[in-house]
Image (spheres, rainbow, N blue to C red):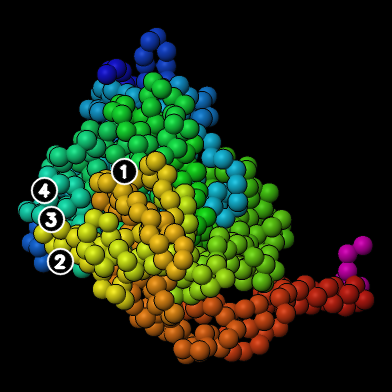
């Protein structure tokens, strides 16, 4: 660990400030300047950090709750003091730094070549560094559009304002720089007297109980909730999470061990990575093709114990993009309305008194700067940024701003009077997809063929395989373990298509997960032909077994799987949208979304999509502006006719 002497910098640069000041007698809280600079001296060289308050870290509705009494706890909004900074090393535009001044100085910095983490008193700090990785360009909907993870954390009181927040800042930078995804903290809950769930040595049991607690007790909206525990898990890793669970109330979460800033930040990046569809290398059949480009520091989802790996591998990034392209993570495209006060021009969020906000100087230079100067629209500009803003003008109503990423997604279109693309939604569970072969569930099209291809590389086996073996209640075919975990449960005849997944063949190892037990590999003779029936247990880090048919998969006419039972589609509430009945959805002129709201076809409007509307064109706002301009022109002509016009 390298120890560096810290000096405050008072040069001529206009960002040179102290980070915080002791308040006057009339004030109870310190205040923290919006911008500041520090000089670090090491190796005979001065390193200057230019920093600003990180307004993208906390949401404006961010709350902290102390669950000491176990009965709802005391809650307070934390908008009073914001003391978390980020920025860069001066002269190194690809560097970054994350720093807290809440209780003295604590920081993490990174330059182009090195990674360092900081534990600091008010005089000394120690460092570690890392470098961003460019995200591969691709579809606008999943790569260039910024994603937002609204995160809630539950933790022990000792880390509330120090280590945890700094670890979050570091993970925030990694996700922003490498995945074009911002992490926004929406709430923090503290268990100050006793744990609200049993936290044991087994991280999977703790995760299961914690997700139950989240569903039943946590009120705040979030995309994921993560627990930080002082318990050391009996596991080779410092945390675990449900793979692909982001946006799910029952699977959107993880558990993490306490540690120093750097290791805890990387653990959080790993568990959040699992939530957005990333696998550990050993759980990926193509791991040999995904060797980390940095053998010295390693990559974040590596299995080997590298200290502070600094980036995601290409395979991890591709898995995230695939997760989004297949309909996962739909909640990540919904931008929080605003971030933690105080309001500030340049944070990228439109706030009271601002006409526009294209972000920092660098962000404005990339997009929106021609339309927005100092948070004021330039002459004749309607907007500066957003998926529905082009050349400083609103896109026409009906223009697609976020295309569908699959059969189960719904494209979003511009309203004509806003620069922002509407809320991201997908089809309600139960819609048919892939020409009637599958059903939508959680925004994805579920089929047995698709699952077999994804996990084992071959199509699903004949129905007869499911009917013959899944009623046995053996390792060769079943509907899961018995409650004691010692035997196998036979499927009821109606549920055989929702049990053990049967494919026509298997690869030598699953494409995802780790194979457990002996695979089922049988050939049967039925109706004058031989049929191959193959299956195996492919277990993920979170304990999920991909060897069973997924929820939402069709199991008969108007039937879908749920918890290894075959249920009628009407159980999934497909007809809850206005203007809907079992035979008619949204008056036949729209699609029912996962928010139980009708998304109308282009020519229809209304809550139930029953009203015809005018063809796409300028919005009412545009028409009003045009009318005002016309009135001004007429007035000018009249004034000119009476001698008051300009020459």
Alpha carbon of mark 4 to alpha carbon of mark 3: how far?
22 Å
Q: Magenta segment, which residues?
A: 643-647
The extreme front residue here reads 528
Alpha carbon separation for disc pair 2 and 3? 39 Å
Q: Taking 505 as reference, is 561 above or below it?
A: below
Front of the two marks 4 and 1:
1
What number is the disc on residue 514?
Answer: 1
* Image spot of residue 204 (x, y percent): 20, 50
Quadrant housing residue 37: top left
- For the question of whether residue 215 can be seen, the reply is no
Q: Residue placed farthest to the top in the image?
A: 44
Residue 329: quadrant of the picture: bottom left
**SS for tag 2?**
loop
Counting residues from the N terminus, which is met first, the one under dot 2 or under dot 1?
A: 2
Residue assigned mark 3: 486
Query: Are discs 4 and 1 less than 8 Å apart at CB?
Result: no
Query: Residue at the location (25% across, 27% down)?
Result: 120
Foreground residue, 22 or 620? 620
From the image, state whether disc 4 or disc 3 is nearer to you: 3
Residue 200 image label: 4
- Could you tell me which secondary element the residue under label 3 belongs to? loop
Going from N to C along the chain, the mark reached first, 4 or 2, is: 2
- Mark sitting earlier along the chain (1/3): 3
Whether the residues at callouts 4 and 3 have beta carbons within 8 Å, the answer is no
Quarter in which the C terminus is drawn: bottom right
Instruction: Confirm whether the magenta stretch covers residue 645.
Output: yes
């Amino acid at each position: 660990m390298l120890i560096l002497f810290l000096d405050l910098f008072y040069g001529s640069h206009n960002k040179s400030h102290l980070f915080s000041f002791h308040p006057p007698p009339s004030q109870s809280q310190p205040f923290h300047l919006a911008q500041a600079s520090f000089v670090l001296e090491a190796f005979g060289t001065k390193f200057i950090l230019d920093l600003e308050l990180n307004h993208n870290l906390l949401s404006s509705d961010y709350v902290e709750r102390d669950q000491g009494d176990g009965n709802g706890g005391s809650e307070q909004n934390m908008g009073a003091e914001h003391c978390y900074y980020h920025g860069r090393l001066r002269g190194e535009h690809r560097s970054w730094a994350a720093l807290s001044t809440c209780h003295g100085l604590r920081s993490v910095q990174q330059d182009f070549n090195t990674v360092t983490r900081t534990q600091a008193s008010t005089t000394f700090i120690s460092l570690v560094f890392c470098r961003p990785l460019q995200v591969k360009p691709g579809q606008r909907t999943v790569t260039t559009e910024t994603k937002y993870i609204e995160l809630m954390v539950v933790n022990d009181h000792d880390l509330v304002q120090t280590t945890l927040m700094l670890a979050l800042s570091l993970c925030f930078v990694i996700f922003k720089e490498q995945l074009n995804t911002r992490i926004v903290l929406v709430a923090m809950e503290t268990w100050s007297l006793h744990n609200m769930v049993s936290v044991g040595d087994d991280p999977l049991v703790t995760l299961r109980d914690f997700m139950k607690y989240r569903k039943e007790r946590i009120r705040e909206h979030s995309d994921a909730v993560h627990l930080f525990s002082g318990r050391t898990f009996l596991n080779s890793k410092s945390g675990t999470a449900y793979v692909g669970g982001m946006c799910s109330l029952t699977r959107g979460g993880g558990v993490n061990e306490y540690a120093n800033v750097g290791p805890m930040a990387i653990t959080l990046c790993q568990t959040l990575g699992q939530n957005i569809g990333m696998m550990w290398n050993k759980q990926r059949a193509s791991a040999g093709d995904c060797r980390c480009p940095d053998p010295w520091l390693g990559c974040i989802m590596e299995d080997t114990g590298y200290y502070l790996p600094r980036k995601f591998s290409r395979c991890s990034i591709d898995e995230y993009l695939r997760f989004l392209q297949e309909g996962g993570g739909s909640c990540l495209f919904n931008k929080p309305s605003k971030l933690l006060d105080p309001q500030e021009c340049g944070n990228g969020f439109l706030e009271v008194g601002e006409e526009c906000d294209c972000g920092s100087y660098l962000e404005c230079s990339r997009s929106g700067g021609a339309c927005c100067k100092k948070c004021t629209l330039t002459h004749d500009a309607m907007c500066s940024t957003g998926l529905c803003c082009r050349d400083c003008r609103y896109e026409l109503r009906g223009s697609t701003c976020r295309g569908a990423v699959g059969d189960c997604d719904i494209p979003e279109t511009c309203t004509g009077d806003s620069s922002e693309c509407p809320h991201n939604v997908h089809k309600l569970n139960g819609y048919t997809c892939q020409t009637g072969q599958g059903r939508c569930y959680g925004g994805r099209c579920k089929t047995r063929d698709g699952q077999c291809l994804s996990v084992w590389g071959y199509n699903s086996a004949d129905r007869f395989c499911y009917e013959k073996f899944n009623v046995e209640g053996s390792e060769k075919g079943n509907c899961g373990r018995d409650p004691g975990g010692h035997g196998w449960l036979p499927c009821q005849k109606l549920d055989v298509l929702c049990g053990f997944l049967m494919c026509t063949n298997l690869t030598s190892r699953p494409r995802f997960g780790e194979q457990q037990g002996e695979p089922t590999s049988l050939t049967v003779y039925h109706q004058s032909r031989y049929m191959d029936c193959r299956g195996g247990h492919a277990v993920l880090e979170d304990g999920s077994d991909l060897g069973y048919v997924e929820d939402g998969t069709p199991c008969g006419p108007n039937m879908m799987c749920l918890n290894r039972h075959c249920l009628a589609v009407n159980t999934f509430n497909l007809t809850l949208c206005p203007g809907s009945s079992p035979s008619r959805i949204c008056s036949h002129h729209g699609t029912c979304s996962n928010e139980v709201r009708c998304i109308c076809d282009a020519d229809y409007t209304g809550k139930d999509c029953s009203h015809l509307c005018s063809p796409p064109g300028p919005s009412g706002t545009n028409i009003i502006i045009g009318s005002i301009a016309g009135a001004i022109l007429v007035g000018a002509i009249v004034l000119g006719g009476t001698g008051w016009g300009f020459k």
